[in-house]
Every structure is written in structure tokens, then in C-alpha cells.
Amino acid sequence: MTTATATAFTARYGGSPDGVWAAPGRINLIGEHTDYNEGYVLPAALPHTTTVAARRRADGVVRLFSAQGDGEVTELALDALAPGSVPGWAAYPAGVFWALIEAGHALGGADLAFCSDVPTGAGLSSSATLECATAIALDDLFGLGLDAPGRALIAQRAENAFVGVPCGALDQMASSCCVAGHAHFLDTRTLTGRQVPLDLPAVGLTLLVIDTKVKHDLGDGAYAGLRAGCERAAALLGVPALRDITIAELGTAEAQLPAELRPLLRHVVTEDQRVLDTVAALDAGEPRALGPILTAGHASLRDDYRVSCPETDLAVSAANAAGALGARMMGGGFGGSVLALVDTALLDTVERAVHAAFAEAGFGAPQTFTATPSQGAHRVS
Ligand code: ADP
Ligand code: MG
């Protein structure tokens, strides 16, 4: 990947890059739709990365190329960057230049070429990989002195304000801050947390990702509606965010809400508890306990939050029927990927069962791969 990225750089711009950086996609073990409720998440970085080869320029010009993009080099003037001004994929890296300038950093122009093996639109945070790779490259090239959480916040600002996607901090914090062999337990209110050791191969377990390859259109509007519903529920309950309601207070709180907001509250409160339960199980050396927690999380997303779809439901039920310890959809919903916890000895059986179930249902073939907790954004060469 590194060589391919440097080659793509030279083919577009001539000469050699000043360096090559990589930012990984992520899974999220548990903690879905909790980040914008200021709750808990538990991501781990994938071995799949977006790499960027980059070189400083003396003028204020930014050039952007992606091997997975539109085939064009996008050329921009640094002093003309404004939210909404850059169409398509280039808005993600351009937004990072903009967010760094907005935060008061002194930047020059640069040439960037991206290469990625992170599936896009699959709930694995490919958009955050573009942003976080750009942020670490610019941090190094211009000596900005940021740390990993600082780069993540710049990346999130780029996606929120420049691209216009109102995402929480999960994706960018995961891509920037994860550590190999660990899951990153993160409180998204304080942005504090800790690395939780996650050595599943040592206990004969594997995390299987099933990319359903579908993305239903209702996703974008639904996300904004769910977010607004959570904010309304928090306001009615008189708390800053739904993370302030504990599992013990859930029943009382539900009774104070109109019927249509109760399922949203139920999902968020029980999901935060599932993150805490998962961390407790990992700390206690009981990783097999994750299985039922994953499946309960899926039921909550399907029945209360209502963001599942036939393809993700089928991937979960087929994996579980074939012997997975548990499974759930990941990401915003309406498609994307499913995460299953599987005894390594049963991996082939589960993968085959999921493929067979998709074929029988007349769905397109999913893509399956295993997820080894990997390193967050870093310099490669
Ligand atoms: P996710 O982040 O879950 O993969 P998003 O919808 O947030 O899904 O981001 C997907 C978008 O990010 C794609 O439609 C594309 O515009 C952009 N993108 C991601 N990776 C790349 C890449 N390597 N090259 C070009 N565009 C990319
Ligand atoms: Mg994204």
C-alpha cells in the first residue's frame, strides 16, 4: 500500500513525497448511536488503512488525488477554502486544511495522494480515515505539535462543519487514537478513556466483519431525525444529554416522555450499559461474555432504534444460527457491516452460512474478513 501510494503520488505530481502516513478504519465492539448522546463507545482499529503520500508546497495551493476517487486531481487555493465549497470526496481532506486554519495553525500548500483498502460506506469509517490521514500528515509536514486526540477533533470539525455531516467523535477518535491489540474505551463527553487489552486469538476467538455491501438511502435523513429525537428527549428530561440517565433511572425517565421518544431513550441508556458491561467482561478475562451483549445490542438497534434492515438482520441471524457467540450491526444503520464474535474453529462454518443465507434470500454477496485490533494513525515512511 505504501509503495502504491508513493507511486500514485509520483505519477500525478512528479518527484517524491516528503512522507507517507496511514490512518485505519475501525470496528466498534459496542456503543452505537451513543457518541452524539455524550455516552460510551468501544472501537478498535482495523488493519485496513487509508495511506497518504504528501509533500509541502511553497505556495498556497492544495492538490488532492485519490486512487479510489473520481480519477481527477482536485486543485484548491488555501485562502479560498470555505464550508460547502468543495464537492465530492475531496471535501474530507480539504476540510482538514480548513479546520486547522480555523484553529489558528499556520499552514502552507501541499500535494496529497491517497490509496485505501478501507471499504467505503460500510460503517467502517472510511471518511474518518481520509481526515485522520490528512491531519497527521499536515501535523508532521508543518510541525503543528498536535497529539492524537487533538488531530481527531480537527478531523471531526472538518466532517461536521466543512463536509456538513453532524457525526459524533467516535470515528475520528478511533482512527487517530487506537492502539494495536486493544479496544479503546472512550467517554465521548470528556474524551477520556483507556485502552482495554483485546487479545482474542489467545483465547481462540475471532472478530468477523460481514460487509453487507448495501446502503439504503433513508440513512442520511434518519440519522438527523434520530439525533434530534435524542436531543428533544434530553431536554424534556432536563439533562444535558441522554448519557446522564442511568439504567436504574430508565423506567422513571421513560414514563416522562411521549411514546415516540421512549424507544430512543431505551436504546441509548441500555447501550451505554452494554459498553460498561463489555469493558467489565474484558477486564475480568471473560471475552466470551461479549457474545450475548452484541446480540442484545443488535436487538436494541433493530427494535428500539429501528436502524437495522433485512440484510443486517439476516447476517446477524445466520451467523448466530451457525454458532457465532453473538453478532450485531455496526455504524449508522440501514446497511453497512455486521460484527460477529466467533470461535476461530467455527470461522469457516459461519462465513459459509452467511454467504449461503444471502444467496438464498436473493441478496448480493457480502464481503467477509476478520478484524485484528490494529494501530491508530501513524507515519509509515
Ligand atoms: P463510512 O465513513 O462509514 O465509510 P461515509 O458515508 O461517512 O461512510 O463516507 C464514505 C465517503 O467517503 C465516500 O462516499 C467517499 O466520498 C469518501 N471516501 C472514503 N474513502 C475514500 C477514498 N479512499 N477515496 C475517495 N473517497 C473516499
Ligand atoms: Mg463516515
Image: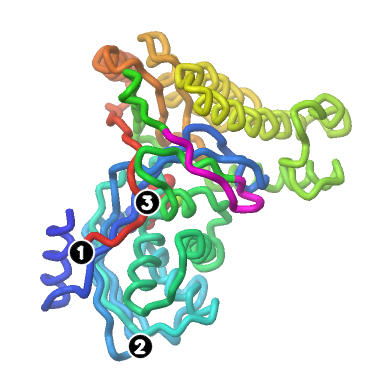
The amino acid at mark 1 is Ser
The mark lying in front, picked from 1 and 2, is 1
Helix, strand or loop: magenta stretch: strand
Figure disc tally: 3
Label 3 neighbour load within 10 Å: few <14, some 14-19, many 20+: many
Res. 104 mark: none
Query: N-terminal of the two: label 1 or label 2?
Result: 2
Which residue sits at x=49%, y=21%?
290
Residue 376 is tagged as 3
The relative height of residue 204 versus residue 367 in the rendered view (above or below) is: above
Classify 357 as above or below 186. Answer: above
What is the spatial separation of the Cα atoms under label 3 and label 2, in whole angstroms?
Answer: 29 Å
Q: Is residue 356 visible?
A: no
Magenta-highlighted residues: 187-197
| Residue, disc 2 | 60
Q: Secondary structure at mark 2?
A: loop
Which numbered tag is attached to residue 381?
1
x and y percent of residue 248 in the render?
Answer: 79, 26
Dot 3 or dot 2: first in sequence order is 2
